[in-house]
Image (cartoon, grey):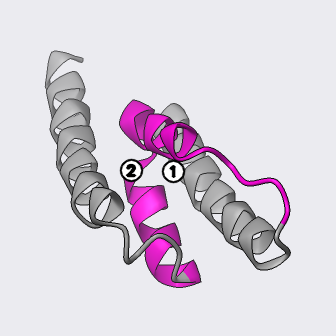
């Protein structure tokens, strides 16, 4: 549970950081890293970060990919919870 919370918090923060970097026209977080953190448990945080910071909301890969990863993350958490 702590891992899941930490990953979602981290994904949220990294979305905000990337948005700030974009505004300042400085070095950005690679998109593959944003997807990686979402894949390994931070999809809900990434989704909330997208909406809160209005970041990557026009990119189809994020519009559809992050919600799919939310479903995958929830299903994985459910499956792991049933195993315990």
Asked if marks 2 and 1 touch (Cβ < 8 Å), the reply is yes
Q: In what quadrant of the picture does the C terminus appear?
A: top left
- Start-end of magenta stretch: 26-53
Residues packed near mark 1 inside 10 Å, few (<14), some (14 to 19) or many (20 plus): many
Direction top: furthest residue: 83
Q: Does the segment drawn in magenta span residue 36? A: yes
Q: Could you tell whether 74 is left or right of 3 in the image? A: left
Residues packed near mark 2 inside 10 Å, few (<14), some (14 to 19) or many (20 plus): many
Q: Could you tell whether 68 is left or right of 41 in the image? A: left
Q: Secondary structure at mark 2?
A: helix
Q: Which residue is mark 1?
A: 8
Q: Residue at x 63, y 49 (%)?
A: 10
Q: Earlier in the sequence, mark 2 or mark 1?
A: 1
Direction front: furthest residue: 25
Question: In x, y percent, where is residue 42?
Answer: 46, 45
| Rendered position, 11 above or below 83 | below
Q: Main secondary structure of the magenta part?
A: helix
Q: Nearer the viewer, residue 72 or 19?
A: 19
Q: In what quadrant of the picture does the N terminus appear?
A: top left
Q: Which residue is mark 2?
A: 43
Q: Could you tell whether 33 is left or right of 80 in the image? A: right
| Spatial CA span between label 2 and label 1 | 7 Å
| Rendered position, 58 above or below 45 | below
Q: Does the segment drawn in magenta span residue 35? A: yes
| Rendered position, 18 above or below 53 | above
| Rendered position, 30 above or below 82 | below
Q: Nearer the viewer, mark 2 or mark 1?
A: 2
Q: Nearer the viewer, residue 80 or 75?
A: 75
Q: Residue at x 46, y 39 (%)?
A: 4
Question: In x, y percent, where is residue 55?
Answer: 53, 74
Is residue 23 something that shows in the picture?
yes
Q: Residue at x 38, y 57 (%)?
A: 44
């Amino acid at each position: 549970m702590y891992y899941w919370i930490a990953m979602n918090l981290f994904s949220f923060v990294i979305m905000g950081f990337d948005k700030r970097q974009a505004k300042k026209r400085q070095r950005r977080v690679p998109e593959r890293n944003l997807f990686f953190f979402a894949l390994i448990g931070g999809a809900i945080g990434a989704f909330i970060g997208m909406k809160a910071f209005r970041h990557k909301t026009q990119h189809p890969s994020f519009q559809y990919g992050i919600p799919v990863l939310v479903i995958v993350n929830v299903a994985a958490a459910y499956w792991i919870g049933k195993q315990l």
